[in-house]
Image (spheres, rainbow, N blue to C red):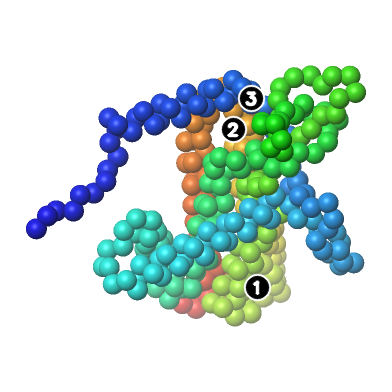
């Protein structure tokens, strides 16, 4: 019986491919020297006219972060379909990306169950897994070539000159150089921008995390869960300690609200700062030097996704555990 031959990466042969790509990168950066893209906080609009114009929502334009979010959703659906197909195939040990995803999900489930218990772990796990995997894909999107660098060119007073790549192609590239007298400058509005660099996304995700934490608390303790934030039960029977409990409850309420800002700005700040660093390094020392920082951003994106998901899971587990009178009643 002939053994199946598996194709493996052979460094002795394929190193020439890597060398050729490096040489091509240096040649291309010599022909079209890289420039620092326009850096701005708000997402750039791709549509000249609003896609929604209503008295309630106002004018909503199609932005490059919306396009990126649609691509992330499509990728998530494809991953789900791939895992579903692998489970139906009858293979006891899934291979490739489905096997890696199964291992990650199993690890996250065991972690959730050990933190929140078997009963609540099953209910908290979907939020933990969904948030972690979504944020992970969103963060890694900035590492894909073409993101933040391929798009539409718009007129700009402080932009750069453009040069057509091939005559009659209609494809242009921004080039370094000063604008001549009366010459119009241009800047790129990318088709796709990493969603985590849009504060709307991080703020919305933080709202979902904090609101669903309260929902879990209410499901576990009923309406009495809110006594954690407004405790006046002993304010007359024990005035001093009653006032102290009331003040602690207000601090808990402020802490819960501050989680929204903490979640939103932590994720946004880290990924936006990483994007700016990649822009600057890529414009100063392209190709090899930027590859080192791409590896750094790979780990930063993974760490931020895990931190966001872990904090959400931990806060939900704390909300379902006993507090105050519930803990005493349990004892």
For residue 32, the mark is 3
Identity of the residue furthest to the bottom in this view: 222
Location of the N terminus (image quadrant): bottom left
Residue 327, position as x, y percentages in the image: 50, 72
Q: CA distance from mark 3 to mark 1?
A: 60 Å
- Relative to residue 84, is residue 58 drawn left or right? right
Q: Secondary structure at mark 1?
A: helix
In this view, the residue in front, 299 or 4, is: 4
Q: Closer to the N terminus: mark 1 or mark 2?
A: 1
Q: CA distance from mark 1 to mark 2?
A: 45 Å
In this rendering, is residue 141 above or below 245?
above
- Residue drawn at the location 51% of the way across and 35% of the way down: 294
Q: CA distance from mark 2 to mark 3?
A: 18 Å
In this view, the residue in front, 116 or 291, is: 291
Q: Which residue is mark 1?
A: 226
Residue 43, position as x, y percentages in the image: 73, 47
Q: Which residue is mark 2?
A: 278
For residue 280, the mark is none
- Residue drawn at the location 51% of the way across and 57% of the way down: 132
In this view, the residue in front, 327 or 106, is: 106
Residue 247 seen in the figure: no
Q: Closer to the N terminus: mark 2 or mark 3?
A: 3
Q: Secondary structure at mark 2?
A: helix
Mark 2 or mark 3, which is nearer to you? 3
Residue 100, position as x, y percentages in the image: 36, 56
Mark 1 or mark 2, which is nearer to you? 2
In this rendering, is residue 153 above or below 88?
above
Q: Secondary structure at mark 3?
A: loop
Residue 279, position as x, y percentages in the image: 63, 32
Disc 2 vs disc 3: Cβ atoms closer than 8 Å? no
- Residue drawn at the location 66% of the way across and 31% of the way down: 166
């Amino acid at each position: 019986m002939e053994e199946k031959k598996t194709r493996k990466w052979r460094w002795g042969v394929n190193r020439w491919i890597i060398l050729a790509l490096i040489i091509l990168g240096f040649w291309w950066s010599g022909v079209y020297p890289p420039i620092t893209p326009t850096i701005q906080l708000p997402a750039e609009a791709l549509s000249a006219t609003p896609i929604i114009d209503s008295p309630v929502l106002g004018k909503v334009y199609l932005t490059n972060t919306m396009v990126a979010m649609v691509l992330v959703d499509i990728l998530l659906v494809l991953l789900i379909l791939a895992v579903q197909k692998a489970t139906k195939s009858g293979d006891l040990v899934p291979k490739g990306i489905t096997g890696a995803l199964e291992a990650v999900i199993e690890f996250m489930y065991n972690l959730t169950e050990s933190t929140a218990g078997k009963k609540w772990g099953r209910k908290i796990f979907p939020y933990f897994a969904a948030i972690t995997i979504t944020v992970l894909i969103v963060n890694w999107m900035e590492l894909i070539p073409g993101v933040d660098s391929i798009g539409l060119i718009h007129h700009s007073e402080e932009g750069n000159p453009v040069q057509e790549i091939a005559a009659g192609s209609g494809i242009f590239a921004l080039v370094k150089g000063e604008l001549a007298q009366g010459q119009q400058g241009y800047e790129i509005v990318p088709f796709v921008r990493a969603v985590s660099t849009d504060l709307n996304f991080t703020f919305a995700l933080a709202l979902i995390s904090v609101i669903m934490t309260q929902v879990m608390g209410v499901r576990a303790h009923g309406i009495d869960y809110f006594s954690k934030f407004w405790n006046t039960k002993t304010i007359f029977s024990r005035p001093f300690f009653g006032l102290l409990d009331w003040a602690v409850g207000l601090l808990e309420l402020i802490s819960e609200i501050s989680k929204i800002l903490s979640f939103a700005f932590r994720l946004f700040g880290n990924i936006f700062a990483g994007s700016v660093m990649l822009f600057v390094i890529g414009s100063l020392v392209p190709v090899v030097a930027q590859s080192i920082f791409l590896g750094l951003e790979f780990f930063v994106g993974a760490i931020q996704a895990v931190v966001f998901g872990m904090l959400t899971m931990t806060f939900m587990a704390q909300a379902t555990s006993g507090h105050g009178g519930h803990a005493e009643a349990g004892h």
